Image (cartoon, coloured by chain):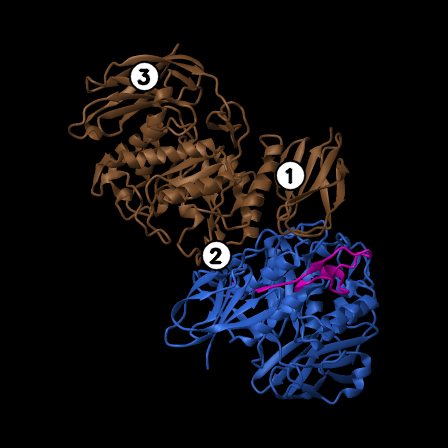
Chain colours: A brown, B blue
Amino acid sequence: MITRRTALGALAAPALFAQARNRVERWGIHEITLEGPREGNPFVEVRLSAVFQQEHRSVEVTGFYDGDGVYRLRFSPDSPGEWRYTTRSNHRDLDARSGAIECVPPTGANHGPVLVRNTYGFGCADGTRYSPFGTTCYAWTHQPEALQEQTLHTLRGAPFNKMRMCVFPKWYEYNRDEPRLYPFVDRTDFTRFDPAFWRNLEARVQQLQALGIEADLILFHPYDHWGYASMGAEADERYLRYVVARLAAYRNVWWSVANEWDLVKGKTRAEWDRYFQILQAADPYGRLCSIHHSRVMYDHARAWVTHASVQGDEFQKTPEWREAWRKPVIFDECKYEGNIPKRWGDISPEEMTHRFWLGTAYGAYVGHGETYLDAKDVLWWSKGGVLHGQSAPRIGFLRKIVEAAPPDLAPLANPYYPAIAKAGQYYLYYLDYHQPALADFDLPAGARFQADVIDPWQMTITPAGVYSGKFKMELPGRPHLAVRFQKAG
Amino acid sequence: MITRRTALGALAAPALFAQARNRVERWGIHEITLEGPREGNPFVEVRLSAVFQQEHRSVEVTGFYDGDGVYRLRFSPDSPGEWRYTTRSNHRDLDARSGAIECVPPTGANHGPVLVRNTYGFGCADGTRYSPFGTTCYAWTHQPEALQEQTLHTLRGAPFNKMRMCVFPKWYEYNRDEPRLYPFVDRTDFTRFDPAFWRNLEARVQQLQALGIEADLILFHPYDHWGYASMGAEADERYLRYVVARLAAYRNVWWSVANEWDLVKGKTRAEWDRYFQILQAADPYGRLCSIHHSRVMYDHARAWVTHASVQGDEFQKTPEWREAWRKPVIFDECKYEGNIPKRWGDISPEEMTHRFWLGTAYGAYVGHGETYLDAKDVLWWSKGGVLHGQSAPRIGFLRKIVEAAPPDLAPLANPYYPAIAKAGQYYLYYLDYHQPALADFDLPAGARFQADVIDPWQMTITPAGVYSGKFKMELPGRPHLAVRFQKAG
């Protein structure tokens, strides 16, 4: 028996099966459901894949066992028109099933997956602008149902379009609760996945997608007391392939091979390389793929790294790193706004706002997190919930400014003050702790530029005249302002 | 004819000659005046020195020609009792003159010269505390008389106890005036010093001394349009020896071989080494001696460098530099509070205050300067005048705190927040941009410590309880605070 359904951007729940009509949006998901063997350990013993073909192209996707004798294959077509498929399996119930789907144009807010664009930036597959303004809730999908819902509710009103989140549950300060569900049925057996855990994760990824938020899925991390950080090479690979089989088809998925890889004990560099290689081989879509460090950087120049995911506040190194790696640079962790007794979790909202502006002005992307003390230890950075801080609206203000700018702004080489620009068209300077009452600028002489003084904290944009060529401009003489020049029409 | 006078800390003007009684304070100045040849070029042709002897010790000091047939020798005795002297000269009018002086205990605020103490700090020769809290008026002695007087008036009410100032006049932005006096009579002849220039400089050095301010005399600098930065090896040496002969006896003199040595064109590293060597050989007092860079550091480990005079804001490197050089570290320039269109001269008063605290907490000393736009281009950083900024009183507040602390505080190794401490007695943490509402501290368990929360901007010190051992402490949850723990009685 074969059933099919197409997830059209809403929650992929069994209730949707009725919608199946073999039509799927471009970058949506077509899911094939098959019944197969329940005996033994199907996670290990049963192999299933499908080859989807369109004219000369063929794309092989791996299926997965979803428990109760149910097997699924998920395919996200990237080009419109008919795709024909045939399954392959080492079990006859699952092998040589074939069919066809019709890939139709996307609707609504479906702009396709985010890809690297013009070497240093990002963009959606359909050409829509995308600049990451991410936040972090590492363990939000492991919290009680109501808290997960509250997190989604908060995100609906927040300025973030990327979420860093762990697949595995987290054991760390402020995170000493057992998760609601575990990725494996048995705490000591890494061969049997618990479908309930994975269905919840998928549902959350899809809900983020509906909110326009990329899910930056962290595949390994060191904050572990269950053994997930040291399962062994075979289990690691099985896990990665299972994650890919279930989740790669979601167009808003990014892979973060690890958070703080260098703090995970007992794994060699070769193992980290291998994880990338497994993902590269298994993921038919080539989703964005990075790895995040604590103190020791992974070599972001390696071919399988799509963008650098760094920690720290050395934003001024961004131009050098862009040149070295020829990739986008995201400061996914530059400390968190908050007040906990941790120096990584107690920076002021002014400092967080400042870091977003500084990173942006150097040509990087910056990530948010929030760690305010809470009586129930519900800190946004890990469990989600509600935002208590003051930087989020300022990040939203910056996001609007960036999204209104021409695309593919590049940092100026050796600027007097850090700035990103599109030569001859647009210049966005951030003056950091400087407070000149007069400042020198050097713009092209052949054009006129409308100047604005921007206050990132007050969130005001004040027109400040029209300039051209080399000039001195009067400024308010306060620190932490930005100055924008846009070519006048 | 021999006349003698002793400068007792007041202006060394001819009117004081009447006070000469062959008694001189320890670390004061005994000046011997001789008449000698006027013909030819006495600056080049006449050699004059005196050997001062006390029991087994002999100290040779060089004399100098002061114009109009007058020669002077200045001696600053460092130990009480009788000193006998005999002059030496290649001219018979000046040779073999002898006499004796009685060195008596110091009076008033005469604590002797500042010396390096306990490797990383400073102190007065009599044991009095001294921590540099310097400011910068590079060209103040080259300004009109009234402006020089105004600078001294300002300093009287300011918190600074060190002044960075150039011997040579300065030609630079905001400094396009010819000086009131020139170091040489003729603009193209570096063999004839102009005594009027030097008398003014000496008077200013002595006035600073009366205000308790060390004169950090910059001997070479790149901001030149007279040729003083490229006089040639012979003239350089004659100049250095003349400076030493006239000024080394003033106990508040420090030598800064150069400001931004690496921006001076045409001098080799060997020449800079040689300047140090000349000073070492000529200066009988071994005054403090440093060199300041712009981008390329001089090797501060060299034996003739008494302390590192660095530029920048990498305060966190101080512990490493202390270990590497085994010397005090002064951030003599970390940018200036102001609003001019220069990124080195437009930092906010909050940022300047912050830099003083951060540097202090890392075990360094920090220098001030101020560059607010002025209709007449009188910027404190160069010409002196009045202070317009808001950091100076905050620097005074920090100075009081440091001076009330035990001496020889050392930076904590790998502190959670930067701190200087005297183990078991005193801890001063600066929390920078952190705003923990709770913070962890780890003090000795065997003692009780009175805690204070210090607001460096509001200049408040708020008692915050008594603690011991490992504990969590509630804090206001605002950034840029300091926390002090002092052993309770």
Asked if marks 2 and 3 touch (Cβ < 8 Å), the reply is no
Residue wearing tag 2: A339
Q: Which residues are magenta?
A: B362-391
Q: Position of residue A9 (x, y in %)?
A: 43, 26
Residue wearing tag 1: A428
Where, by quadrant of the figure, is residue A373 drawn? bottom left
Q: Secondary structure at mark 2?
A: loop
The residue type indicated by label 2 comes to Asn
Q: Is residue B150 visible?
A: yes
Chain on which label 2 sits: A
* Cα–Cα gap, marks 1 and 3: 48 Å
Chain on which label 1 sits: A
The residue type indicated by label 1 comes to Leu
Work out which residue is located at the far left of the displayed protein and give it.
A40
In the image, A228 versus B399, the foreground residue is A228
Give the mark, 2 or 3, whose residue is nearer the N terminus.
Answer: 3
Residue wearing tag 3: A51
Q: Position of residue A295 (x, y in %)?
A: 41, 48
Residue at the (45%, 31%) spot, across then down: A209
Residue at the (59%, 65%) spot, across then down: B456
Vertical placement of residue A65 versus B381, above or below: above
In the image, A243 versus B27, the foreground residue is A243
Q: Residues within 10 Å of mark 3 (few under 14, many from 20)?
A: some
Q: Any mark on residue A143, and which?
A: none
In the image, A87 versus A105, the foreground residue is A105
